[in-house]
Image (cartoon, helix red, strand yellow):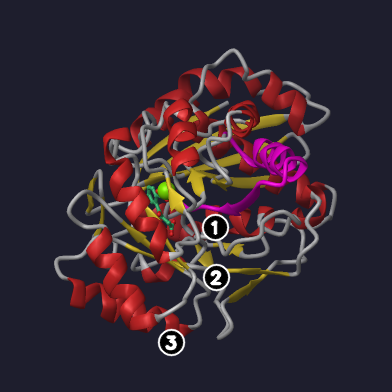
Amino acid sequence: MKIKKIVLHKVEIPIVTSFTTSFGTLTNKPTVIVKIETYDGIIGYGEAAAMPFPFYSPDTIDICMLALRDYIAPLVLHKDFPDVQSLMDSLKIIKKHTFAKAGLETAVWMALSIQQDTALKVLLGGTQNKVAVGARIGIKKTIEEILDEIAVKLEEGFQRIKIKIKPGWDITVVEAIRRKFGSILLMVDANSAYTLEDVKLFKALDQYSLTMIEQPLADDDIVDHSVLQKEITTPICLDESILSADDARRAIYLHACKVINIKPGRVGGLLESKKIHDVCQKHAVDVWCGGMFETGIGRAFNIAISSLPNYVYPGDISPINLFYVDDLVKDSFTVDHYGYVKVPEEPGLGFDVDEKKIERYTVEKVTIG
Ligand code: OSB
Ligand code: MG
């Protein structure tokens, strides 16, 4: 694979509703679409779906644009790489910047899939034909509001409910959900809003049989997570803390979690996702696919990687037309009434990229090479 040209699109599609987590409210969600052209004329699209602000991770959309333009593109353009591993090895000198790296890496996977005329699922070692999908629900103004939204999501077939929590919006909400909906698959995501001082609260949450608690403590603190996991029975799932397979290995070694949420963007791409999947599988730690409100382009990679055998919990891969007013692929996927999405069997994304839409929503464009 030899890349001739890289085009970066900072894209802004208006969103349907805002989304509130413990770190703030998202009122617009730009993304970066990376288009590559290889010397043999193949086009690949990837996505760097960071947040617009550094409240989830240090990466932001503008930082991704800069990292891709000034550091990542110059290291890969016009060089021949025999495989994705060697291409990613050439980027090792750049510390972290995982979202930006994933933007390029996913574009390379798409091009490779077309070049080899083989579905992404097959290239990645996927075994499942369909993957389970969960619904994620932000923090609301009232408990009634969240109960109403959950009722709709369950009716639509979503296989589990994930709610966002923060101090003051946690145990009473969980209590109300359990009372109304009984033993549904229910989990909570704190996005690092708590500390070890809150052990009592987490012990109290144990009685609600949550499927897991996602990222209760600081993003850079697997030690405290390991202390907390010893105190509670609810499985801890790490999101923000895990940026690589090495991070996963260390977290497992310290018993800091029982589940890992793998987001291809957060960990630098699909190859690293696969490595995390493999480490977890070896140690009987279950994984599932998280999301960053990717457009249909990024979601296609998330679906492909979710077909690997150790992705056992429903993923945050709900159709993105529930979030954006428009999409960058034509005829994106749907979730069936049982809460499954089909894994594409065709080479490439499995969905047609709508280049006109990319141009229409582009607010900044950079061509390199
Ligand atoms: O913590 O999982 C998270 C979105 C932005 C930042 C962090 C998170 C999320 C989500 C989105 O939960 C899930 C999705 O893409 O549907
Ligand atoms: Mg999370």
Circle 3 or circle 2, nearest the eye: 3
Say above or below: 362 vs 253.
below
Q: Quadrant of residue 210?
A: bottom left
Mark earlier in primary sequence (3, 2): 3
Residues in magenta, as a range: 268-291
Dot 1, how many residues are within 10 Å of its Cα: few (below 14), some (14-19), or many (20+)?
many
Secondary element at tag 2: loop
Secondary element at tag 1: helix
Residue 299's disc is 1
Residue 155's disc is 3
Residue receiving disc 2: 332
Let me know if residue 22 appears in the view.
Answer: yes
Let me know if residue 362 appears in the view.
Answer: no
The quadrant of the picture occupied by the N terminus is: top right
Query: Is 290 in front, or is 112?
Result: 290
Task: Judge left or right: residue 195 versus residue 112.
Answer: left
Say above or below: 29 vs 271.
below
Is 19 magenta? The answer is: no
Circle 2 or circle 1, nearest the eye: 1
The picture places residue 132, in percent across and down from the top left corner, at: 61, 69
The picture places residue 247, in percent across and down from the top left corner, at: 58, 28
Task: Judge left or right: residue 164 versus residue 267.
Answer: left
Query: Is 357 in front, or is 345?
Result: 345
Dot 3, how many residues are within 10 Å of its Cα: few (below 14), some (14-19), or many (20+)?
few
Say above or below: 300 vs 192.
below
Q: Residue at x 81, y 47 (%)?
A: 115
